[in-house]
Structure formats: structure tokens, C-alpha cells
Amino acid sequence: MSESSPPHPVTTEAPPIRALLTLAVLALTLVLLIAPLAVVFAEALRDGLSAALASLTERDAWSAIRLTLFVAAVSVPLNAIVGLAAAWAIAKFDFRGKAVLITLIDLPFSVSPVVAGLALVLLYGSHGWLGVWLQAHELKIVFAFPGLLLATLFITFPFVARELIPVMTEQGRAEEEAALTLGASGWHMFRTVTLPNVHWALLYGVLLCNARAMGEFGAVAVISGKIRGQTTTMPIMIEMLYNEYLSVAAFSMAALLAALALLTLALKSLLEWRHADLLSATRRH
């Protein structure tokens, strides 16, 4: 029996080239990611920790924090439910229009958030297509919480579904068909077979959806009207404070938003590390 050949190197570049590429990536990471974050936290603490915390407890700032968390708390579960249902339908069933449904799921990736916000204003605004009917029934969408929620739902819609579709497609339908053959009901089959097989990918998509929901600016800025203390989320409040030359307050809120994003990134990385085999089909972010 012949001896096994030595393993081939992963790359064929010479060591100096690999070192140069590594240094280039590290330099770009430092310039584009680490340095801006360091500046944000440094500016937030320029007048001390007490000043930064005091700026976050101001009435308008606290209102923006609460509104951001509330929008995320409502939009993320809704997108998780809809995304799970859409992924299940696409991966487990054959039907006409499947390609169209997949295209619609990807639509928010290709549409500018500002355009999405403007479309919602033209649809639900006082002079929009549904504006007269909404006013007649005393329903307010634009410049109110429902508009913020709709804008956030649109922008974050693809994240959960797009993480689940590859996993469900790769797993196939054999286990579900076996459960139905053994007499399980549709709901029991979904709860005991389908959901346990995708729960880590679902959580992964939820984390990405949550990060996007808290950081959304474009669509929310258009439809919110930027009413201080009522429809200003954290990203909008950061812009308003900075334009008013309240640098410490602006950077303090930016630091808080960055900290929430870093926490989401840490949870995402933990999932990738502990469950790499289950998430390999969705690792594209």
C-alpha cells in the first residue's frame, strides 16, 4: 500500500506575500473598524463617565433609548415568526411562485432604506393612497410608532428567512415525512422535528435582525418626522445631538448603540464557535 502524500498547503503564495496580505487586512481592520470605535468611546468619555451617563438619562435621550428597544422588541419576534414560516414553505414545499417569493424576501436588500421610508410615507401619509381612509378612522401611521415599526419590519425582513432557508433545504423533508407517517400532527411535527433542527440558525438570524433593527436610520428617519421625545430612535437622536453641537451627548449615545451592537456580535461569534456545523450553511455575514 503506497504511503499517503503530504497534505497540500492551503495557499500557494510565498510567505512574504502571505505576511503582506495579513498585515494589509489588519491595517484595514484597524483603520475602518477599531479606530472609529475607539474615537466614539473616547469622545463619549471626554468629560468623564458621569457626564456621559448624565447625558443618557436626559428625558429625550432616555425616550429614544426606550423607543429603540421597544421597536426592536416588537419587530424582531414578528420577523422571526414570518421568516420561519416563509423558510418552511420555501424549503419544505413545492408550489408555483416560489422563485417570486424568494425574490420578494430579498427585496429589502436591494432597495435603499430611504426609498423604503418614502414609499411608506406615500402610502400611509395624509396625502398618500391610504391617507384619507386612515384619517377618517383616526389611525395614524406616519410620524408615529406604527410607521417606525413598519419601516423596521421591512428593512429587517430578510434576515431570519435567509438564515433558515439554506439549513432547511439542506436537511430535506425525510424526517418530517417520517413523523407524519407515524401519526404526528402537523403542529406536533413542526414543534418536535423541524424547530429543534433549526433553532440555532433561527437564533443566529434573530441576532442579526436585532442588530439591524436597533441601528436602522434611513427608513425610520423619513417616516418618523424626527419628533423629539416621540419618534426619535437612538440613531436619529445621535444625528440631532451632533447637529446641535452636543458632542458628548451624541457620542455617549453612539457608544451605547455601539456597545449593544458589539454585544450582538459577541453572541453571534459564540454561536459560530460552538455550533459551526449547524451554521455553516448560513455563514455569509
Image (cartoon, helix red, strand yellow):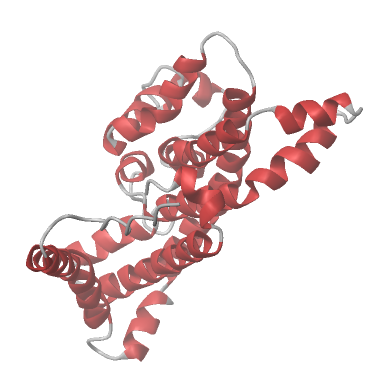
**Side (left or right) of 43 relative to 20:** right
Q: Nearer the viewer, residue 11 or 59?
A: 11
Residue 116 image point, x, y percent: 34, 32
Using the image, determine if residue 162 lies above or below residue 107. below
* Residue furthest right as drawn: 183
Residue 60 image point, x, y percent: 40, 66
Q: Nearer the viewer, residue 86 or 230?
A: 86
- At x 9%, y 66%, the residue is 20
Whether residue 250 is visible here, answered yes or no, is yes
Q: Nearer the viewer, residue 266 or 59?
A: 266
Q: Dividing the picture into quarters, in which one does residue 214 lie?
A: bottom left
Residue 36 image point, x, y percent: 19, 70
- At x 42%, y 38%, the residue is 151
- At x 19%, y 76%, the residue is 39
Q: Dividing the picture into quarters, in which one does residue 148 lie?
A: top left
Whether residue 206 is visible here, answered yes or no, is no
Q: Nearer the viewer, residue 20 or 201?
A: 20
- At x 33%, y 55%, the residue is 5
Residue 173 image point, x, y percent: 68, 27
**Side (left or right) of 176 relative to 7:** right
Using the image, determine if residue 59 lies above or below residue 180. below
